[in-house]
Image (tube, helix red, strand yellow):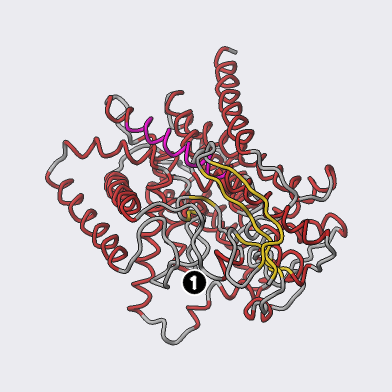
Amino acid sequence: MSRRRDTILELSVLTALWCIAIAFIDPRGNFPLHDDWDFAIATFNFARSGHFEFTNFTAVSLRAMVLWGAAWTRLFGESFEVLRASTLTLSLGTLLVVNRTLARAGAVRGVRLFACAALLFHPLFLWLSCTYMTDIPFVFASAVALYGFVRALESDSMPWLTAGCVAVVVSWFIRQNGVVTLAAPLALLLVRREQLTPRWRAFVLVIGAYLGAFAMLFVFRREWLSGSPAMFATHYHMWLESSFRLPEQVAVLQHYLLFNAQNVALFFLPLTLPLIVMIGRMRRRDGILLGVVALIITWRLADLALAGYLLPYTTDHIYSDILPGNLFINFGLGVPMLYDTFSLHLPYPFTIGTVSRALLTAASGVATIAMLWTLLRARGGLVLQLALAAAAVGTLALFGSGYYYDRYSLDSAWMVVLALPLLIAWQKRLARALACVALACVAAFALLSVQEYFRWQRARWQVWDAFRAQGIAAEQIDGGAEAFGFYELAHAPLAVARRGHAARPYAIAFRPLDGCRVVVRVPFRSFLGLRSGEMVGLAR
């Protein structure tokens, strides 16, 4: 009973921290964010008709998420705020599952709470928690699956193994790549065999059966694995191009792996910065490994810097695999898909200087080197091995896609939050100090940036409503990608998206523009009053 009370208290503390963070952000507003207009339409359609009806732009499989969101819609009504609440619930659930998984790994309470705080204040996790994007539901299902696999391998339990596999099925009906999660326990079973369970062959057969089921769907019911097969195919277009040969394939693999490592190290800074303490004392073999890792990462960052790219990466000019769509932009969060910032490629109003960007890039490089060096040397128990295997498989699977955005680092490698806390030298005062300082900095940035994102979004949609109140048709307003998607693209062919649309009489932007008259102004303030901006409605 005492242990149960301690567990309830710990989870209550974690829940309270989550509630405080979300209350501070205040993610109100009945409007779409980023690409969630697409997923909302499918959900609203199912809530009305009971049938899966996707747009031509739905690349992901999505069905499990649609069922979840439609249940919320039936209960609480049709709005983006309701769908956002459904994602927030899974965000909290993910933290609780991660906490219990770390408990199975033997992490003490303080370490468990710190690791969960590092995940909560992971800037992309926090931002995505406040949307109806697919990432948080996917991470939740993956977290449940890994917990099931841990329990199965710890206690030689077939029911827990089945539960883990079922959770993977749920994840692949959110994002198809969820199937790769099965590879982590399968690899451990094949390598360690009797060391894990005397029934390892039976476990392998069960996992193989689920992999076989996915293969059957892919062959005979491929349409079930995406909303729009044509849109899904665009994510793998490069594999169909004759120019995509071995040298190009090696380059893309290298880019994706290094981008993913850098993003993981940067956004999990509270868990990667304290790893540098371990570099002080090492054997010669470890020193050689450190030198190799440092050389590769330094070369990559220098290559980007010489091409004009420093964090936060932007698409001022196309280089490598940097695409317009990263969530971390100009020291803020959330893609500003408006006329001036997205169509005209003008900068987000709040920027940091070149020196600050260079320092941020260098700091991310140090964290990346320390993280990779530590993970490559890691030895430990079941949870550590399973987490590292899942992160490695998820990262390698990115190679199959023709696109890479920074949020993919969360989908593919969130599992390092289960591994890194087990590798930090918590007994060292310097490690604890670095971890706490990094958590304070990252949490402040994440909270203030997501809060800012919702403040300018609410201002933006006030401008939209002002235009509409004047009787201006939606087709006459360039209100940004979300407005165009939700109000116009929903049932349009893919060719319409590729063409875009011609200049419109009215537009919404962060600033006045030459040749345009300001019709509406809606100010907003953020970062505790240190930033002041406005959304403007323009007439040509």
Looking at the rendered structure, the kind of residue marked 1 is: Gly
Q: Which residues are magenta?
A: 434-450
The mark tally for this picture is 1
Camera-side residue of 464 and 322: 464
In this rendering, is residue 87 above or below 20? Answer: below
Q: Position of residue 142 (x, y in %)?
A: 56, 48
Q: Which quadrant would the C terminus be assigned to in this image?
A: bottom right
User: In the rendered structure, does residue 442 fall within the stretch colored magenta?
Assistant: yes
Q: How would you rate the neighbour count of disc 1 (Cα within 10 Å): few for under 14, some for 14-19, many for 20 or more? A: some
At x 48% / y 67%, what residue is drawn?
323
187 displayed left or right of 203: left
Most distant residue in the right direction = 49
| Picture coordinates of residue 368, whole percent (x, y) | 32, 50
Q: Up-down: is 144 above or below 480?
A: above
- Foreground: 479 or 23? 479
Q: Is 375 in front, or is 262?
A: 262
Q: Residue 513 placed where, x, y %?
A: 58, 67
Where does residue 401 sit, x and y in percent of width and height?
50, 69
Farthest top residue in view: 2
Residue 522 part of the magenta segment: no
325 with respect to 339 (left or right): left
Callout 1 secondary element: loop
Q: Residue at x 60, y 13 (%)?
A: 1
Q: Is residue 41 above or below residue 72?
A: below
User: Which residue occupies 62% across, 61% down?
Assistant: 509
Classified by dominant secondary structure, the portion drawn in magenta counts as helix
> Which quadrant of the structure image shows residue 76?
top right
Residue, disc 1: 402
Query: Within the image, what quadrant is residue 251 found in?
Result: bottom left
